[in-house]
Image (cartoon, rainbow, N blue to C red):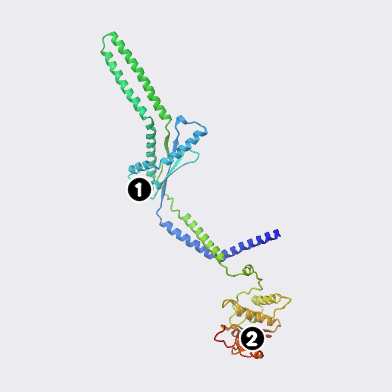
């Protein structure tokens, strides 16, 4: 039982897919038209947009030589350094100096939006890009930004040792002055004891000077070993091909989006449409079997296709409908059949008239009664008078039925028209 239910579910899903495919095929012209219109609109907008150019530069961040090792921690530190520098390059101080250097008349917020800085993963490289409607301006900003940031980084790194260097430099200068002073006194001295004392003093101060000079060099070496450097390995060149708008890409995307929206609208419309259009809809919504399907035909009024073209496929469809009605209830054969609908012009007259003809052609005595007391048309189809008919029975006895019923040229078929229409059919 479960396998049967699963197979039925698969069949329903497959039928749903086929229904949607048929829907898309039927409305393919609309989907294509929506794509063409969307693509044309995108193309017109894209070609009128001002082109934007992008200048790129690649920067190498060299780690301090004193911390240059090959362990995992140093690699992580190097990547963090490139990420830190990427954030610092768009800081307000850097942008202000670049703007002043180039004489830009651009707000800092707009200038920051023009600049994009990102570290290259697993490397010590940083990619800098500047977008502008002026290609020369984009290249100048990119190159100037690297130069300004390099100078600021060097100033920050030098400030850490500046105090020590200044103190040692002052001591060296003072020591040079004292050594020169004692040398002058040594040259002017005449006594041997005085010369020995001054000579010892000069040697002592020279030793102190040597120690201070060594300390000064050690500070400079430490500064060099702990300072990272920034190198512009690929300067920004003037771009000549705009990066946006991408006319072809925008057009293709607009075509795709337009077709998808049209297809989605059709699916939504189909999902919300609860009208009956196919035999499957009748079986699915009403739970009733379909007795037959009648195709449209171009037979001119007032002719009936089952009489005018009895061998046509449409006439065969009416005969199939007749057969299905006959076998709808074998135990109690159908003797009376009512054909009705909720709205006018839905085919009541055409179906009932042709069904009456094919039953009469099968040798059965058939009486077709027109009960439409508002818009009767049966008498027009069979070219009969409507002076008496169904409405006459309301003021006469049933004995008058045989005289009111009219015989047609089709054997075994008689017609009871509506007769005179009352003022109040209800």
Is residue 23 depicted above or below 199 in this figure? below
Foreground pick, 36 / 375: 375
Q: Position of residue 255 (x, y in %)?
A: 50, 59
Left or right: 344 as drawn, with respect to 413: left
Q: Quadrant of the C terminus?
A: bottom right
Q: Earlier in the sequence, mark 1 or mark 2?
A: 1
Left or right: 277 as drawn, with respect to 129: right
For the point 39% across and 33% down, which residue is it? 157
Is residue 66 in sight in this rendering? yes
**Residue 5, image quadrant:** bottom right
Foreground pick, 329 / 367: 329
Q: Residues within 10 Å of mark 2 (few under 14, many from 20)?
A: many
Is residue 344 depicted above or below 64 in this figure? below
Residue occupied by mark 1: 107
For the point 34% across and 26% down, which residue is it? 167
Q: Are marks 1 and 2 in contact (CB under 8 Å)?
A: no
Residue found at the very far top of the displayed protein = 192
For label 2, the SS is: strand
Q: CA gap, disc 1 to disc 2?
A: 92 Å
Q: Position of residue 182 (x, y in %)?
A: 29, 16
Is residue 329 depicted above or below 250 in this figure? below
Is residue 309 in sight in this rendering? no
Left or right: 275 as drawn, with respect to 162: right
Foreground pick, 407 / 283: 283
Residue occupied by mark 2: 415
Q: Quadrant of the N terminus?
A: bottom right
For label 1, the SS is: loop
Q: Position of residue 353 (x, y in %)?
A: 63, 81
């Amino acid at each position: 039982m479960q396998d049967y239910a699963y197979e039925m579910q698969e069949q329903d899903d497959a039928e749903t897919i086929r229904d949607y495919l048929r829907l898309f095929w039927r409305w393919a012209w609309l989907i294509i038209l929506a794509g063409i219109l969307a693509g044309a609109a995108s193309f017109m907008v894209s070609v009128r947009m001002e082109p934007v150019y992008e200048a790129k530069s690649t920067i190498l961040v060299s780690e301090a030589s004193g911390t240059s090792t090959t362990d995992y921690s140093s690699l992580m530190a190097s990547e963090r350094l490139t990420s830190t520098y990427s954030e610092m390059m768009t800081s307000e101080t850097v942008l202000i100096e670049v703007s002043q250097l180039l004489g830009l008349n651009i707000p800092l917020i707009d200038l920051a939006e023009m600049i994009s800085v990102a570290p290259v993963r697993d490397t010590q490289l940083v990619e800098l890009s500047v977008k502008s409607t002026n290609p020369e301006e984009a290249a100048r900003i990119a190159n100037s930004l690297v130069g300004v940031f390099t100078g600021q980084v060097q100033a920050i790194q030098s400030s850490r040792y500046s105090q020590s260097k200044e103190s040692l430099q002052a001591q060296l200068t003072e020591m040079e002055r004292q050594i020169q002073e004692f040398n002058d006194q040594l040259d002017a001295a005449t006594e041997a004891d005085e010369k020995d004392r001054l000579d010892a003093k000069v040697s002592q101060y020279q030793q102190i000077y040597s120690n201070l000079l060594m300390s000064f060099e050690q500070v400079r070496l430490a500064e060099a070993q702990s300072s990272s450097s920034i190198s512009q390995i690929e300067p920004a060149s003037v771009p000549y091909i705009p990066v946006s708008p991408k006319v072809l890409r925008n057009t293709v995307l607009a075509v795709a989006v337009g077709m998808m929206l049209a297809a989605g609208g059709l699916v939504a419309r189909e999902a919300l449409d609860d009208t009956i259009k196919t035999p499957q809809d009748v079986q699915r919504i009403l739970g009733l079997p379909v007795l037959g399907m009648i195709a449209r035909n171009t037979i001119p009024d007032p002719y009936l296709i089952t009489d005018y073209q009895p061998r046509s496929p449409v006439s065969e469809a009416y005969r199939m409908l007749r057969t299905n009605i006959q076998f709808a209830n074998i135990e109690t054969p159908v003797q009376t059949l009512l054909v009705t609908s909720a709205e006018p012009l839905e085919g009541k007259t055409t179906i009932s008239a042709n069904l009456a003809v094919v039953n009469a052609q099968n040798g059965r005595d058939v009486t077709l009664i027109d009960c439409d007391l508002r818009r009767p048309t049966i008498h027009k189809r069979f070219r009969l008078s409507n002076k008496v008919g169904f409405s006459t029975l309301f003021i006469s006895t049933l004995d008058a039925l045989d005289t009111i019923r009219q015989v047609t040229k089709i054997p075994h078929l008689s017609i009871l028209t509506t007769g005179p229409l009352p003022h109040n059919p209800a």
